[in-house]
Structure formats: C-alpha cells, structure tokens
Image: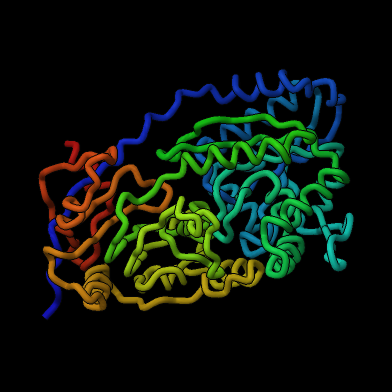
Amino acid sequence: MPPTFPQMFHLHQCYPPSRALDVKALLRDGFDNKSLASQIKPGMRVAVGVGSRGITNLPEIVDAVLNLLRAHGAEPFIIPAMGSHGGATPQGQQNMLAGFGITPETHAPFNTSMDVDQIATFGDGYPIVFSRAALEADAIVVLNRIKPHTDFHGNLGSGIQKMLVIGFGKHVGAANAHRVAMQLGHEAVIRKTAKIILDKVPVLFAVAILEDQHHQTHDLRVLRSDEILKEEDALFVQSQQLLPRLPFPNIDLLIVDELGKEISGTGMDTNVIGREVFGYISSLQAQGTLKHPNIGRIFVRDLTPATRGNAIGIGLADFTTTRLVNAINRDYTYTNSLTSLGLECAKIPFYYDTDREALERAVGSLFEQSANALRIVRIKNTLELDHMLVSERLTRDIDPSRPVTIDPNPRTLDFDAEGNLFPLSALKEKKHQ
C-alpha cells in the first residue's frame, strides 16, 4: 500500500527586503572613484569575461560595463569565462550566454575560442594558462558574483579570483587547477595562481556582485586590479551573511523542483543542502559556527532550461524522474564532471516515470513513514528559499525566534493527470489570489 503524504503549508522566510539599486549609476560611480578613465586609450580592445552563473540583472550589468568602456573610447568584446562549461566548446559556451540574454547582437562581439597560452608555472611545474583571446586584448575586465563555493570551504569562494584561474583558463586551465587542487587544496591553488595571473595579465578592473537572500542584486563593487586580492576577502565574508538557508535542522525529504548549472556549480548549492562533493568538512562546521540541515532523502524533479542538459549535481540526489534523465546532455555533464574531478556529481540516482512514484519510493525508503511525523520540504531551487512548502510536522519544529511566516491553510501535494506535481510557482500564485 503506497504511503500517505502529509498536509503541506506555505512558509515564507522574512529576509530583509532587497535594496533598490541603480546599476548604471553604481558602476559609473565606482569607475569614476577608481580613476579608471585615465587608463583607457581610444581604440583599446578590452576583453570582458562573463561566466555561466544565473546572476540576477546580468544582461543589464554587462551592458552597463560595455557602455562605460565605449564611452571612454574602448572597443570591448565578450569572452565566455566559464572553464569547461557548455561542453567545453565555443558554440556551447556562446549558447549558455544566449540563455541569459547576452548575445553578439544585443551586447558586443564574442570571441569564444577555447585556445589558451601558458603564462607561468606554479608549484611542481603546474602550468598556468590563460585565454589566448584575452591575452591578445589590450586590457581585461572580470565580472562575477561573490559567494561561498560548493566544492570547498574556507575564506575564499566563487568570485573574481576563481574566474581568473578557472574561467579564463578555459577547459585546459580548469582541468589543471582542479587536478593540483586535489593535492594542495582549492583555496590555496586559486589564491596563489590568481596572484601570478594578476602580476602577468593586464586586468583593468573587476566588477564584484553580491546577491541577497531573495536572489536579487545587493551590491556592485568596481575593484582595481591591485585591490582584488584584498577586497574580495571582505566581500566573501559579506556574501556568507547573505546566503539563504533552510530553516530546519532535520528534514526527512527535500523536494527540489529544478537543478541547474546557472543555479550553482554543483546544480544544487551544497552550502544549502549540506552534502559535500569531495567529502570535505567545512572549517566553519568543524568549529560549530555553520550548521547544515540533516537531510535524509533528496528528490530532484527537473533540469532548468538554462542548464542546457548539464545535470552535474544530480549525483547529490537520491531520487529523480525519467524525464530529467532523458533531458541530460551527457557530453556537457561528463565534460564538466571529469574536469572538476567530482565524478559522483554526475551519477544517476533512482529514477521513476512520475513524481508520484518517485515520492512514494522516497517516502517508502525512510524509517519514519507516518504522514503526521514526516518532515518534508519542497523548494523551487537552492537559490530561491524565501518561499517553500513544508509538512505539518515541520510547522511545529520552527524556532519561534526565526523570522518566518506560515499560512495556516493546509494544502495537499497535488498531482496532475500524469501523476506529476503542479509547479511550485503556480501554487504560490494561487495562494495569493
């Protein structure tokens, strides 16, 4: 007999409201305050590196940077600075940017070449390489979001330095960096390699982006090349404070509606779900200052359209659907996973033809199967955690000091005629009608 699912309730985490920002004004002021105009000469070719993350307002931010450069006589072009993503092919990487609304027609010419040149060595002969197209430019601009990384923990995460080392390193550089990181540690490799790159490559400035718990732009900082190493550390600390989290210490079953490369480097943010890629234990966890939830089972329903079949991270789940498995681009997924050396991230979990069957199997695999006792959470993805559905048991587990609101009207886990859950966004809209 199939298990009975519990009543579910809408829960909202009451994070501080997002700041109202004028992207163009922030970038213009930062550009002027750093006296960057004097470093730009008419006709200067500037390579602007744009990555593969789904950054809110990314087309607007890129457009503002390009227009700033053009206003001072430069001729900017875009380089996909995303390592091995998009199957490590020029067209695949251009397609990823097109998925974010950034194209040669709407923004600037692209140079998608995957060619690199060696510029130095590090450690025991580890070659440091950099995009040849970027090296042929007169100057380079780096643009990325600062946030805790999903593959390692420390005092540096995903951001400007990582993009210089891995993003601009293209497939070869990404593979080299990950390989040596298995011996020396990711943070050490990124820090030391980025310092060498900054000494040898004409980086004009960087744009560091912070996002808040609503996945909205919190701040934009223009950093001169000589400020990057120091300033990124302070921005990283701030990004940790802005990271959204699940408000429960123990969850029996987490339902994730979508997984994608633009959401996180591992498809789902390991800082949210608490599952480590290489078995690393966070230094903050060891100190007891960072607590991840204990999640018994994870069910991932779909891939995002923007991930274009890259299902890296699906190996962190326990259950999924046949439709997700059929949507996997093996070339994109395997290339990314082999480059990062995180092979477990590409492994296929148990999969079933419908959401209903997958959920029944997931609940059936739990020790506790009573509907009244089940602790179930449903989220859209690991970036958007301001709204979720939670089971009745979890409404009783909420710490009263946490800033959350719970709608008192219960609802069931509703399935369509094919046995699949209705979109979470549709349920949210229906609730507010």
Q: Is residue 420 left or right of residue 258?
A: left
Residue most extreme to the front:
287
Nearest the eye: 366 or 429: 366
Say which quadrant the C terminus sits in: top left
Name above or below for residue 347 compared with residue 190: below
In the rendered image, residue 173, in percent from the top left (x then y), is placed at 76, 61
Q: Is residue 79 left or right of residue 391?
A: right
Q: Residue at x 27, y 51 (%)?
A: 424
Residue most extreme to the bottom:
1
In the rendered image, residue 392, in percent from the top left (x then y), is placed at 15, 55
Q: Residue at x 61, y 60 (%)?
A: 86
Say which quadrant the N terminus sits in: bottom left
In the rendered image, residue 373, in percent from the top left (x then y), is placed at 15, 64
Name above or below for residue 348 compared with residue 55: below
Name above or below for residue 68 compared with residue 3: above
- Say how the picture is coloured: rainbow
In the rendered image, residue 4, in percent from the top left (x then y), is placed at 12, 69
Nearest the eye: 422 or 189: 189
How many numbered discs sit on the rendered protein? 0
Q: Residue at x 71, y 40 (%)?
A: 142
Q: Residue at x 41, y 57 (%)?
A: 292
Q: Is residue 5 left or right of residue 289?
A: left
Which quadrant of the figure has residue 187?
Answer: bottom right
Name above or below for residue 429 compared with residue 219: below
